[in-house]
Image (spheres, rainbow, N blue to C red):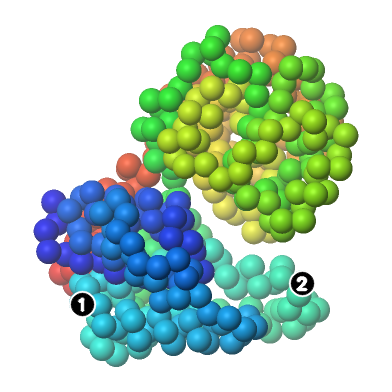
């Protein structure tokens, strides 16, 4: 237990029910005995949820730059009045806010969820590549300079963590909370003829490929889509496809609801396109499929192989016929299906949030005595 230690998380970008920020970090810390405050900017009001005190600074209006400027100012004004032991923020827009807190002699930790300089290179709306390279280099210098001043740095993969110089830093991988998934597993004989995709529903994450693949997959198999369409107009495009009649779009689901759905499905899909920001990342939903005892059909990215070897059919992405043939292999070959499913069950505990939180807890203790 950690009585008396108060952690204040703050974000202007992530929703109050964000999986990593709220359920994994805030709720787990509250359950471990920390006092936890989460400050958000969504306009939904203050609340107390799962032992976490949620403070809302309100939603700002205006253009993108104006919203960032106004929300970061409001965030500093609110957070600086909270008497916490550790201040942990989750957005690159808040780097300067973190620096201001350091000037007040606060303990500040930056939780970097993504490789932002690398992502800038692929944001085409920023202009031609030569301009994006200039932006990326400038931001990289800015980010690394700010982080040197903080007490701690957290990131989701070693390749990002290693880029920073900081007095204390650690990789806390975004593995799933698995006990709910383990508890909800059904035996193979009781599972429904369902293919499942969970996460942000986008073209680069393969949604059109999955729907097209249904053309070559036998009835009565259906596709479950769980998550939110980005952009929302993509839903209309999907509905116009002939195979949409075999899709069940379920929207966002709670952890308990998701566990029940995965525990009764047959095959998990994670065939993301070979975009740069996916090639060196970890697909959290893939680990959820494993914990639910599902064999996977997934992209053949080299970075993923050590985690999913023996649990998945790994294929070249963006090819609906290849997706369908891999699914049909699992439907027709019972021995292969059971072999991959068993390997998923055997390996899933290597990749759990339960294990990662132990590391995070030790990190907080280190920050407190540094």
- CB atoms of marks 1 and 2 within 8 Å: no
Residue, x 63% and y 15% (percent of image)?
336
Between disc 1 and disc 2, the foreground one is 1
Label 2 sits on a secondary structure element that is helix
Residue, x 83% and y 32% (percent of image)?
243
Question: In the rendering, which numbered label is found on residue 83?
Answer: 1
Between disc 1 and disc 2, whose residue precedes?
Answer: 1
Disc 2: which residue:
124
Residue 159 position, x and y percent, is 51, 60
Label 1 sits on a secondary structure element that is loop
Determine the image quadrant of residue 185. Answer: top left
Residue 309 position, x and y percent, is 56, 32
Residue, x 72% and y 21% (percent of image)?
221
Q: Is residue 244 above or below residue 63?
A: above
Q: Compare residues 11 and 247 and report the one nearer the observer.
A: 247
Q: Pointer 1: residues within 10 angstroms few (<14), some, or many (20+)? A: few
Q: Compare residues 89 and 340 and report the one nearer the observer.
A: 89
Q: How far is the residue under mark 1 from the one under mark 2?
A: 41 Å
Residue, x 48% and y 35% (percent of image)?
257
Q: Pointer 2: residues within 10 angstroms few (<14), some, or many (20+)? A: few
- The quadrant of the picture occupied by the C terminus is bottom left
Q: Compare residues 133 and 14 and report the one nearer the observer.
A: 14
Residue 23 visible in the snapshot: yes
Left-right relation of 137 to 42: right
Q: Is residue 348 above or below residue 86?
A: above
Question: In the rendering, which numbered label is found on residue 117?
Answer: none
Residue 316 position, x and y percent, is 76, 39
Residue 162 visible in the snapshot: no
């Amino acid at each position: 237990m950690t009585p008396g230690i108060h952690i204040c998380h703050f974000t202007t970008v992530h929703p109050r029910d964000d999986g990593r920020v709220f359920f994994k970090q805030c709720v787990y810390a509250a359950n471990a005995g920390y006092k936890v405050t989460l400050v958000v900017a969504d306009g939904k009001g203050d609340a107390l949820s799962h032992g976490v005190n949620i403070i809302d600074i309100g939603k700002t209006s205006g253009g993108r730059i104006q919203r960032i400027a106004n929300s970061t100012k409001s965030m500093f004004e609110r957070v600086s009045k909270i008497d916490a032991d550790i201040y942990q923020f989750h957005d690159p827009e808040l780097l300067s806010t973190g620096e201001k807190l350091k000037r007040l002699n606060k303990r500040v930790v930056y939780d970097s969820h993504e490789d932002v300089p690398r992502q800038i290179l692929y944001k085409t709306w920023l202009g031609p590549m030569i301009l994006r390279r200039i932006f990326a280099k400038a931001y990289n210098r800015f980010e690394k300079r700010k982080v040197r001043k903080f007490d701690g740095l957290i990131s989701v993969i070693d390749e990002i963590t290693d880029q920073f110089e900081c007095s204390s830093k650690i990789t806390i991988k975004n593995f799933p909370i698995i006990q709910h998934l383990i508890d909800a597993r059904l035996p193979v004989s009781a599972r429904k003829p369902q293919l499942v995709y969970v996460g942000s529903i986008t073209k680069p994450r393969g949604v059109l490929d999955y729907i097209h693949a249904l053309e070559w997959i036998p009835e009565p198999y259906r596709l479950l889509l769980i998550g939110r369409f980005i952009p929302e107009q993509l839903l209309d495009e999907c509905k116009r496809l002939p195979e949409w009649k075999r899709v069940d779009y379920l929207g966002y689901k709670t952890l308990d609801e998701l566990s029940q759905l995965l525990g009764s499905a047959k095959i998990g899909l994670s065939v993301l396109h070979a975009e740069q920001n996916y090639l060196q990342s970890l697909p959290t939903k893939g680990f959820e499929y494993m914990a639910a005892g599902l064999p996977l059909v997934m992209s053949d990215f080299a970075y993923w192989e050590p985690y999913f070897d023996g649990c998945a059919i790994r294929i070249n992405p963006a090819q609906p016929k290849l997706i369908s043939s891999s699914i049909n292999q699992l439907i027709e070959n019972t021995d292969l299906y059971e072999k991959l499913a068993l390997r998923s069950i055997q390996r899933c505990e290597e990749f759990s949030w339960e294990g990662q939180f132990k590391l995070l807890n030790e990190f907080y203790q280190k920050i407190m005595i540094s």
